[in-house]
Amino acid sequence: MKSAVVAREFEERGWKFGAGQSERNGVLPPTRRKRCGRNANECRFEDMSESLRREFDAVDRTTDPNDFVKYLDTTRATNFFQQIKRHMLELLELRAGESAADLGCGTGEDARAMAERLGPRGRAVGVDLSATMIAKARERREADRARESGAEFLQADVQRLPFVDESFDAIRAERVLQHTPDADAAIREMVRVAKRGGRIVIWEGDLDLFIIDAEDYETSRAMQRFICDGFRHGDIGHRLYRRFLECGLEDVRAIPLVGRFTDFKLIENAFDLPAAVERAVGQKLIDRERAARWLESLRQAARAERFFSAIGGFITFGRKG
Ligand SMILES: C[S@@+](CC[C@H](N)C(=O)[O-])C[C@H]1O[C@@H](n2cnc3c(N)ncnc32)[C@H](O)[C@@H]1O
């Protein structure tokens, strides 16, 4: 079963789902320490919550940006993200000689995959806010020169792209808008720099589609919402369809993809559920004893091999008319 394969793969690789990096035993991972601005053990939950919302929009300001490189390498290797990336590449309909951009390109693999398809007469540009990501993307391109025609990498903000109007035949963006302060500005920029007839393809997960099965449904719902709200735009996945239409894009489609997870450890680690529960209790969103019972019920379900969780998202496609 694919979900089991994905889950096992995630666990083996120690994958963290976006926000969750362990704060267990009062020890923060390197990425959190500097943001808290004080000794790790003095860090308050509110600081961590803020950090969860913001860390991927400021990779360079964390003490170990390479953590983010490792995170991307780990997620990219999973079946779920391989499936997402393959599907996005198909929808981009790249033809030799065209120009394409990957916005929020991270370590550059997707821009390089586009460059291979575009050939030597084409142009593929990877854009990322983070100098660390751009340096890593260039380093990997150099190490792999033999395999491709070359992609350019540029440090820039997706909210203010340094390209003239109608520069690209195809634009992709994956997992960046959830971290972008003004997602609408970013979408407007994508439309601006797309050529007439150009394709825009975005993948975003949607934590409104985050299910944790438990007898205490209300607490599951409260925690799902709390975790979703911990991101800048945790629910952006389902909001892109309307936004694409409002921008005047044509042939707009939203393709849903869902990952199922029966491995409690995976979800517990990915969202750091114990710490998330503690924060929700601290903010008086849920009752402490009820929350503890809820968490214990999930652990029991895991022991009985009955734990079930799922996370969905959308690839949204649009064409500039
Ligand atoms: C979760 S990673 C996804 C990377 C890549 N798209 C992938 O799927 O492997 C988000 C990336 O967006 C970048 N980013 C965040 N805010 C950005 C912005 N305003 N403009 C450009 N890139 C941004 C981060 O530096 C990071 O590399």
Image (cartoon, grey):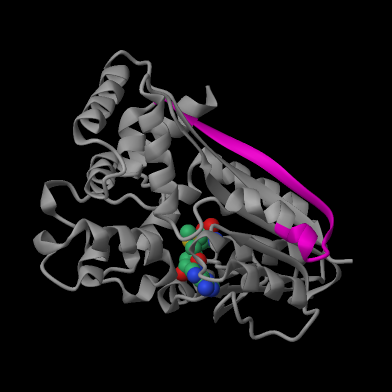
Quadrant of residue 190 in the image?
Answer: bottom right
Residue 32 seen in this snapshot = yes
Residue 140 seen in this snapshot = no
* x and y, in percent, of residue 199 in the image: 79, 62
Query: Quick one: 169 or 158, which is closer to the camera?
Result: 158
Quadrant of residue 45 in the image?
Answer: bottom left
Q: Give the residue at x 74% y 86%.
A: 164
Residue 251, magenta (yes or no): yes
Query: Quick one: 202 or 51, which is closer to the camera?
Result: 51
Judged left or right of residue 312, residue 120 is right
Residue 123, magenta (yes or no): no
- Against 146, is 201 above or below? above
* x and y, in percent, of residue 279 in the image: 25, 48
Judged left or right of residue 148, residue 305 is left
Q: Give the residue at x 22% y 72%.
A: 34
- Magenta-highlighted residues: 243-262
Q: Give the residue at x 17% y 46%.
A: 24
Magenta span: predominant SS is strand
Judged left or right of residue 55, residue 232 is right
Quadrant of residue 47 in the image?
Answer: bottom left
Query: Quick one: 226 or 98, which is closer to the camera?
Result: 226
* x and y, in percent, of residue 15 in the image: 37, 45
* x and y, in percent, of residue 128 in the image: 52, 73
Q: Give the residue at x 39% y 72%.
A: 58
Quarter of the image with the C terminus is bottom right
- Against 119, is 162 above or below? below
Judged left or right of residue 142, residue 168 is right
- Against 152, is 45 above or below? above
